[in-house]
Image: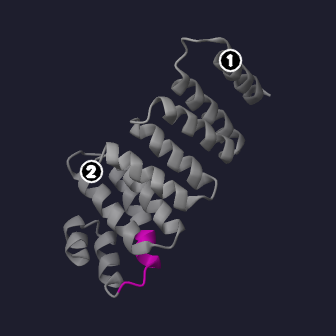
Amino acid sequence: DANIQVEELIQKVLLNTETVDEATLHNALSLVYNIKGDYNRAAEEVELALVYSPKDYVLWNRLGATLANGKRAAEAIAAYREALKICPNYTRARCNLGIACIQLQNYKEAIEHFITALQLQQSYSSILSSTIWMPLRAAVVRSCLPYALDLLAAVNEQDLEKCIRLLN
């Protein structure tokens, strides 16, 4: 199996090299475990990578995604928040945070994170914004907010300003 060969090679490099960039190797090993669906071991490897690169917001986001894939959304939220402490405008972590909030049925907070992500994307002409509207819509549909129908109409029209007004 190719995954096992890659895993063994990475572990061998970790054991035999003093000058190796351990963060990169632990990160690579986490990807192997992710592919295999072993999310607990993948998370452990990302955590080891973070020992060497604690300010790497992409690694914090990867830890969150790995934890979320392993059905550990509450822990994922903490990792996404760490990524956002380091890089507040990191849209991917903001979206992932919204998705984790949906998993925990915290729809209002999820909506707020998706709106923030859309605001961040306004400064770019990004394809990503179209992928943010879909989970935003899902959060609105599931929410029991008194203004949910109006908010859903604004989401369907992709009217960000109206969404912001309704939330405030």
In this rendering, is residue 48 above or below 116? above
Chief SS of the magenta region: helix
Residue at (62% x, 59% y) in the render: 71
Q: Residue 30: percent from the left, percent from the top?
A: 61, 35
Residue at (46% x, 43% y) in the render: 60
Residue at (43% x, 38% y) in the render: 58
Q: Residues within 10 Å of mark 2 (few under 14, many from 20)?
A: some
Q: Is residue 30 visible?
A: yes
Q: Nearer the viewer, mark 2 or mark 1?
A: 1
Furthest residue in direction right, as rendered: 1
Say which amino acid is labelled 1.
Leu
Residue at (40% x, 55% y) in the render: 95
Specify the label residue 81 is tagged with.
none
Specify the label residue 15 is tagged with.
1
Q: Quadrant of residue 48?
A: top right
In this rendering, is residue 146 above or below 10? below
In depth, the one of 154 and 75 nearer the eye is 75
In depth, the one of 73 and 48 nearer the eye is 48
Q: Residues within 10 Å of mark 1 (few under 14, many from 20)?
A: few
Q: Residue 118: percent from the left, percent from the top?
A: 29, 57
Q: Earlier in the sequence, mark 2 or mark 1?
A: 1
Label pair 2/1, CB-CB below 8 angstroms:
no
* Quadrant in which the C terminus appears: bottom left
Q: Residue 79: percent from the left, percent from the top?
A: 47, 50
Q: CA distance from mark 2 to mark 1?
A: 43 Å
Q: For mark 2, what is the residue?
A: 121
| Segment colored magenta | 137-145
Membership of 44 in magenta stretch: no
Badge 2 marks a residue whose secondary structure is helix
Membership of 144 in magenta stretch: yes
Q: Residue 150: percent from the left, percent from the top?
A: 29, 82
Q: Quadrant of residue 2?
A: top right
